[in-house]
Each structure stands twice: as structure tokens, then as C-alpha cells.
Amino acid sequence: EADIYQTPRYLVIGTGKKITLECSQTMGHDKMYWYQQDPGMELHLIHYSYGVNSTEKGDLSSESTVSRIRTEHFPLTLESARPSHTSQYLCASSVGTVSVSTDTQYFGPGTRLTVL
Amino acid sequence: AQSVTQLGSHVSVSEGALVLLRCNYSSSVPPYLFWYVQYPNQGLQLLLKYTSAATLVKGINGFEAEFKKSETSFHLTKPSAHMSDAAEYFCAVSDLDKLIFGTGTRLQVFP
């Protein structure tokens, strides 16, 4: 069983607030990802990282930012939350040796964010 | 660019019946294909993946999928549904350094 954690699990917050969604994994995986998931829609990759000090933007444009200072930690920050940011955010990690696209990704339980 | 299409956003079966969840892919190169399952209030969990070895791939919980290049399909099956199989299932295809997910199929199992 994968050990990847996300906090908080649920967050309801007002417009304009700064928020940070936490993601940690204890597997020593180099690669980590953030996805946005809306009901009935595919998962959209918004950020990923190949390792410490590496961050890349995904396919879906996002106003969020990420950092990767430690291998195990990949937080996502929204400087000023808006109702359009309401969604589920899933964090994942993988080890892989060939390429990111063939890795098995292990997912956290997700953070459901509601911005009022 | 690679893409996947999952036919049927909802599938309902009776307990003990065959489960068939459809996935078609579009890929300009030999693809790597995945099926993930998401139980309520949980993250995604890998069921199985195809990486160009055997075309019939066996996964966890009795699921399997067959890669058919001529049909560009990677359908997921299970001979006999169990109540615990009720969940959302996502097909995904590799695209360079990322995975492209389908929109998901919600499986309901009735007693």
C-alpha cells in the first residue's frame, strides 16, 4: 500500500484567502504530481516535479504554484482563492526508471476545496 | 497528441454478472495503457497496466484487460461482479512524460 498523504481532506474557505494544500510521501519517490479533478471530467495534470528543485506546469493552466524543497514534500499554493478554484485536488508520486509516462503513479486521498 | 475515450459514464450490473468497461485510445506510437480505480473519498489505485508485453493483462481484484491494436481498445473486464467493485474507473494512456486520463466510468453493482 502506498504511503502518500494529503491535508486537509476538506477545506471551505472564502474568496481572496491564501491556501496551501499539503502533500507528503514516505516512499522516497523522485516524481510527484498534482491533478485537478471535477465530477464527470478527466483528471487534469496541473503541476509535476522530477525531483528536488524541479517543477513543471502541466496541461491545464492553473493559478496555483508548487515547490519541491524536499523529496517527500510537494505543497500546492493558491495566493488568492476564487470560486473557480473549487475542485478536488489529487497528489501522486512515482518512482520509475524509464520515463514518467510508464511509471505507476500512487495517489493520495485528495483535498476537496470549496471557495465561497 | 494521445487521448482516451471511455464509452459510458455509468455502467450498472447485477452482482455476479460480467463487468465490461470500454476504453479506446488514440496514439501515434505504441502506447502504455493503464486502468485505475477510485473508491468514494479515496485517491486512485492502479488496477493494471499494459507496457507492450503480453496483450492480456491481469490486475488486482480479478480484473483483466486486453490490448487490441487493430481496434485501438483496452477494455476492462471481470467475469463476476461483486458489490465491492462499485467505484469509478479511469483509463489512461501515456503521453511523453505524463498520463492522459479518460473521463471515467462509474460502476454500480446491484444485489
Image (cartoon, coloured by chain):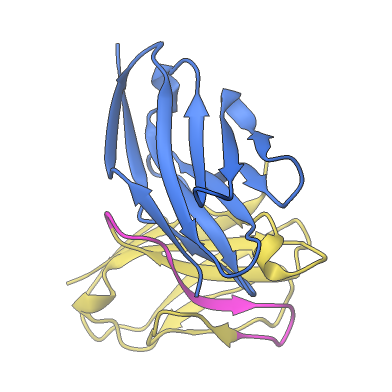
Asked where in the image residue A28 lies, by quadrant, the reply is bottom right
Quadrant holding the N terminus of chain A = top right
Provide residue B11's location: percent of width, then percent of height.
29, 33
Residue A109 seen from this side: no
Chain A as rendered: colour: yellow
Asked where in the image residue A70 lies, by quadrant, the reply is bottom right
- Considering the whole magenta stretch, tell me its main secondary structure: loop
Q: Is A11 drawn above or below residue B97 in the view shown? A: above
Of residues B10 and A2, which is closer to you in this image?
B10
Provide residue B6's location: percent of width, then percent of height.
37, 49
Q: Is B5 drawn above or below residue B105 in the view shown? A: below
Q: Write down the region rendered in magenta.
A: A39-55
Q: Horizontal placement of B43 versus A81: left or right?
A: right
Q: Is residue A100 inside the magenta stretch?
A: no
Quadrant holding the C terminus of chain A = bottom left
Of residues A108 and B37, which is closer to you in this image?
B37
